[in-house]
Amino acid sequence: MFFPISNTHINPIYLAVVGFIIGILGGFFGVGGSFIAGPALRLMGVDWNYAVGTDLAHIVGKSIVAAKQHRALGNVDLKLGFFMAFGTIAGAECGAQLIQALKRAGNVNIVVSYVAIVVYFGIAVFMLKESRKTLRSGRGRSKSGLFKGAESKKDRSAFSPVTRNIQRLEIWPMITLPT
């Protein structure tokens, strides 16, 4: 199928499969799926500026459905989400302007590719630390030695010292969120 705005031919079945995987991961991890959608579109020849913009457009629907499901499960703190939205909107605008500047300079694909690699590496390191800490603690194991379901409100994070230090900072304006 031809997509005229990005001047790209992409098999719609490929897009549906990528969308399905992103939907599962979004509901499971609470991620936007950009770490899959962007590279998946890039793999099909879509320039990064179109991949990013298209992914942002598709995130809206997926986010509404996932947030509704998690709200029904009692997993959504609306106050926290509201305040995060302010930063997200400002960050998205800055990112869009940066993408446009890189596009004008003619190096959007190389710069975004390198930044993506750094971000993916950072995520991998974070997940490795969290997983190693969980495996070493032995908590959450059943009598058979297999892991039970996570108890997120009781789990200790490998980054607890960092988060405690950040939370001690009293930078105006301060808000209080339930724990």
Image: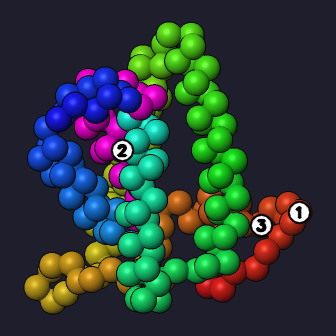
Q: At which x and y percent is residue 87?
A: 68, 54
Find disc 3 in the rendering and name its residue. Answer: 168
Density class for disc 2 (Cα within 10 Å; few <14, some 14-19, many ≥20) is some
Find disc 2 in the rendering and name its residue. Answer: 35
* Three-letter amino acid code of the residue under disc 3: Arg
| Mark 3–mark 2 distance (CA, rounded to whole Å) | 31 Å
- Tag 3 secondary structure: helix
The question of residue 137 being in magenta is answered with no
Q: At which x and y percent is residue 32?
A: 41, 55
* Marked residue nearer the N-terminal end (2 or 1): 2
Residue in the foreground of this view, choosing between 44 and 150: 44
Can residue 114 be seen at all in this image of the molecule?
no
Find disc 1 in the rendering and name its residue. Answer: 172
Residue depicted at 32% across the width and 44% down the height: 37
Q: Which residues are magenta?
A: 30-50
| Mark 1–mark 3 distance (CA, rounded to whole Å) | 12 Å
| Mark 2–mark 1 distance (CA, rounded to whole Å) | 33 Å
From this view, report whether residue 110 is shown above or below residue 66.
Answer: above
Residue depth check, mark 1 versus mark 3: number of the one nearer the observer: 1
The question of residue 34 being in magenta is answered with yes
From this view, report whether residue 109 is shown above or below residue 97.
Answer: above
Can residue 176 be seen at all in this image of the molecule?
yes
Q: Quadrant of the C terminus?
A: bottom right
161 on left or right of 32: right
Residue depicted at 21% across the width and 58% down the height: 20
From this view, report whether residue 96 is shown above or below residue 133.
Answer: above
